[in-house]
Image (cartoon, rainbow, N blue to C red):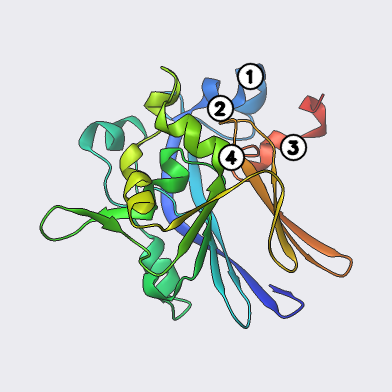
Amino acid sequence: MKLGSAAVNLVTDGTLSKDGGALFGRIPKMDWEQAIKPDRRNRVKMGINLLLIQTPKFNILVDTGLGSKSNDMVKDTYSLNGNKLAKSLKQLNLSPKDISLIILSHLQFDRAGGCTKLDRSGKLVPAFPKAKHLVQKVCVEESKEPSEIEKSFVNQDDFLPLIEKDLIEQLDGESEIIPGIKTQITGGPSMGHQIVFIEWGSERIVYAGSIIPTRFHISPQHVA
């Protein structure tokens, strides 16, 4: 999709499955399962869809997906079929080294897991070594000292190595990344969750991160 001088593409890191009850909250199962069928463990399959924004000067990735570090328990719990991002970028003639900026909606494992990887010696290294990673300051602070609930969804190996390499820029509220691209804090899955606006004239694309996990979450029937 073209938006002014920018090209905007969906890229994928694969799929995962989450518990339908947790995903849809107060919406009765008899309603949501008509739209999206759960598996035998009541899990709903979801795409790990990310955004790539290409401008004349920058290749900007919004979120990095799961990456390759998930252990067997996590793979089983979420029925992971991940680590597809490099292949998805390759289809657009890009490699991880071509990414110059990464905007992270938040630091939970399915959005920030792909920020780091293990090298051949087993050492954690940045997966996008030339990219500056942009995330809300409150999100970093929350993830450094996560609550008991948050501990299940945050892996500090996803972002602490980036801080050590000075590859994280901590944003403080609404921010203009470059002309036409800005972020705004929404809260939600984490206090520092942010969404991304890409604007050109009267046209606008919104990347909602994890606050709208499926298209069924914007059904007028269930919007308060």
Question: What mark, if any, has residue 52 been given in the picture?
Answer: none
Whole-angstrom CA distance, mark 3 to mark 2, is 13 Å
Amino acid beneath label 1: Met
Whole-angstrom CA distance, mark 2 to mark 4, is 10 Å
Q: Earlier in the sequence, mark 4 or mark 1?
A: 1
Question: What mark, if any, has residue 30 been given in the picture?
Answer: 1
Q: Earlier in the sequence, mark 1 or mark 3?
A: 1
- Label 3, on which residue? 218
Amino acid beneath label 3: Ile
Q: Earlier in the sequence, mark 1 or mark 2?
A: 2
Name the residue located 45 percent from the left edge and 38 percent from the top edge: 108
On the image, the x and y values in percent for residue 80 come to 34, 42
- Label 4, on which residue? 210
Name the residue located 53 percent from the left edge and 22 percent from the top edge: 22
Amino acid beneath label 4: Ser
Name the residue located 59 percent from the left edge and 36 percent from the top edge: 192
**With respect to residue 127, does 69 lie above or below?**
above
Camera sees residue 82: no
Question: What mark, if any, has residue 23 been given in the picture?
Answer: 2
Dot 2, crowdedness within 10 Å: few (<14), some or many (≥20)?
some
